[in-house]
Image (cartoon, grey):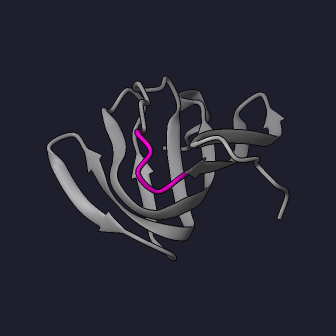
Amino acid sequence: MASLGSKPVQYREFLKVPTLSCGLYRLSAGARDMQAPHDEDEIYYVLAGKAKMRLGDTERIVGPGSLLYVGATENHSFFEIEEDMTLLVFFASPGSRSE
């Protein structure tokens, strides 16, 4: 896996096309996830680590294998990060949905 460095929070994008992007997101244990809502839908796949995730008014524990969907403009964040987190993140523009 490519190194993301030693900063407490890092994101490295490795795919970007008009309707989809993908990258690795890393949060160190004890870090603060200061995300603001995004204009794109997101899918997180937890590769490593343990934390809680807040999505709107809901909280859940997440760890390796957790798959999380976050709709565009939804408030969300990771907190109580107990172990370094590595997540695969996909962003898709709302216009790319097939309904």
In magenta, the rendered stretch is 28-32
Q: Residue at x 42, y 52 (%)?
A: 69
Judged by its main secondary structure, the magenta piece is loop
| Residue depicted at 26% across the width and 47% down the height | 54
Residue at screen point 40% across, 26% down = 37
Relative height, residue 83 to residue 98 (above, below): below
- Which residue is pictured at 62% across the width and 48% down the height? 25
Horizontal and vertical percent for residue 92? 61, 38
For the residue pair 83 and 11, the one nearer the viewer reads as 83
Q: Report x, y in % for residue 5.
A: 76, 47
- With 59 as the anchor, is 99 left or right in this view? right
Quadrant position of residue 98? top right
Quadrant for residue 21, please give it.
top right
What x and y, as percent, mark residue 48?
57, 70
Q: How many marks?
A: 0
Left or right position of 66 against 17: left
Above/below status of 13 relative to 35: below
Question: Residue 80, percent across and down?
Answer: 30, 55
Residue 30 lies in the magenta stretch? yes
